[in-house]
Image (cartoon, rainbow, N blue to C red):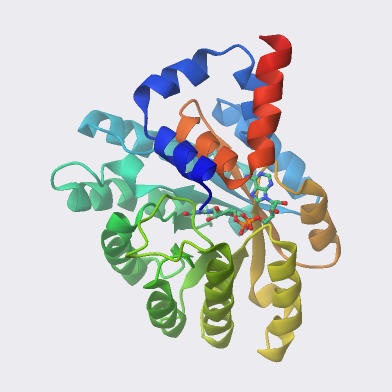
Amino acid sequence: MPVLGSALLAAARSDGLRRLVASAPVTRPVVDRFVAGEELAASLAVTRELTDRGLQVTLDHLGEHVTDAAQALRSRDAYLALADALRGERLGTRAEMSVKLSAFGQALPGGHDIAYRNVLPVVEAAAAADTTVTLDMEDHTTVDSTLAILDALRERFPHTGAVLQSYLFRSEEDCRALAAAGARVRLVKGAYREPDTVAHTDRRAVDRAYLRCLKILLAGSGYPMVATHDPRLVAITQALAPRYGRAPDDYEFQMLYGIRGTEQRRLAAQGHRMRVYVPYGTDWYGYFMRRLAERPANLAFFARSLATRG
Ligand SMILES: Cc1cc2nc3c(=O)[nH]c(=O)nc-3n(C[C@H](O)[C@H](O)[C@H](O)COP(=O)(O)OP(=O)(O)OC[C@H]3O[C@@H](n4cnc5c(N)ncnc54)[C@H](O)[C@@H]3O)c2cc1C
């Protein structure tokens, strides 16, 4: 990862910088490019707009790394309210939910059990709304716990999804295991700052690993969710899928809200399943900094708006 991206990912964990960036008056319009809004109602409005256009969504109530049990319960309750609202929208799996287990208490002492206890009712509520949950993947220290919680949830809710990050050395093995188990797997490159002892740090190596993982998932018995904005990987997936006997409804593409919207609509118009990851809520800082780190042009855009208005 370039030095700038790495510094931004470090900044994503800084409380001081969080306060500074959050209070800068020009921040909001830039954040709005990536975040649907602060309230549940705003996320539902975006959900309707996107699903009306033939896209699907996965909704993320922003929040991560909670530091006490009460905050974890508030995350759970926000998702229960979301599931309830989705039930009313009657969109089925066209609108699913993505959760970060660190928002459910995974990093607290005894956090594995706390996160499981808090996420279970959300997965139950999703099933009652005829939809599903995907467990986002965070930094590498959380992977074992997250995959163990996934296994436990899938005993009753086999459609619960996982995310695997191609930059981690371990992910090919994890892809093999989940592909054989028939799981829904979202494949991403990975968005956290990881040491070179556990992850590829060269972009081309990450891309090559993504391809190897993609082939494993396409060949397996699960449902691959190809989450990338990379035009080359999208084209390769379109070429490879039929060779693995996969029709367009046997896998899906996923992209983030605010990134390559024209491409999202183009793929949907071609008959592909295209799901947009829609974050909402007030705790947008960590998510926003990861988006800046992915692309220097985003940072330049942000810096320009600071300079012209500040
Ligand atoms: C639906 C979805 C869910 C995700 N969930 C997780 C998760 O649970 N855990 C995790 O670690 N990561 C997650 N990610 C993030 C992922 O790991 C990557 O950091 C991110 O998708 C950028 O990688 P890329 O595959 O798009 O390829 P890149 O090579 O980074 O980008 C390819 C092209 O896409 C465009 N692009 C990419 N990022 C941006 C951006 N921020 N702003 C503007 N344009 C951009 C640019 O045109 C760029 O050239 C998720 C991504 C998606 C799409």
- Whether residue 54 is visible, yes or no, is no
Q: Is 157 drawn above or below residue 80 in the view shown?
A: below
Q: Measured from the top left, where is residue 109 in percent x and y?
A: 14, 43
Q: Measured from the top left, where is residue 132 in percent x and y?
A: 49, 58
Left or right of 87 in this view: 199: left
Could you tell me which residue is drawn at 64 percent across and 58 percent down? Answer: 254
Could you tell me which residue is drawn at 43 percent across and 22 percent down? Answer: 17
Extreme-front residue of the structure: 3
Could you tell me which residue is drawn at 74 percent across and 53 percent down? Answer: 55
Quadrant position of residue 253:
bottom right
Q: Is 163 drawn above or below residue 258 in the view shown?
A: below
> Which residue is nearer to you in this view: 192 or 234?
192
- Whether residue 108 is visible, yes or no, is yes
Quadrant position of residue 296:
top right
Left or right of 161 in this view: 195: left
- Point out the image quarter for the C terminus: top right
Q: Measured from the top left, where is residue 67 in percent x and y?
A: 24, 32
Left or right of 21 in this view: 13: left
Q: Is 16 drawn above or below residue 212 in the view shown?
A: above
Number of numbered labels in the structure image: 0
Q: Measured from the top left, where is residue 33 in percent x and y?
A: 68, 33
Left or right of 100 in this view: 279: right
Could you tell me which residue is drawn at 46 percent across and 74 percent down? Answer: 183
> Which residue is nearer to you in this view: 85 or 174?
174
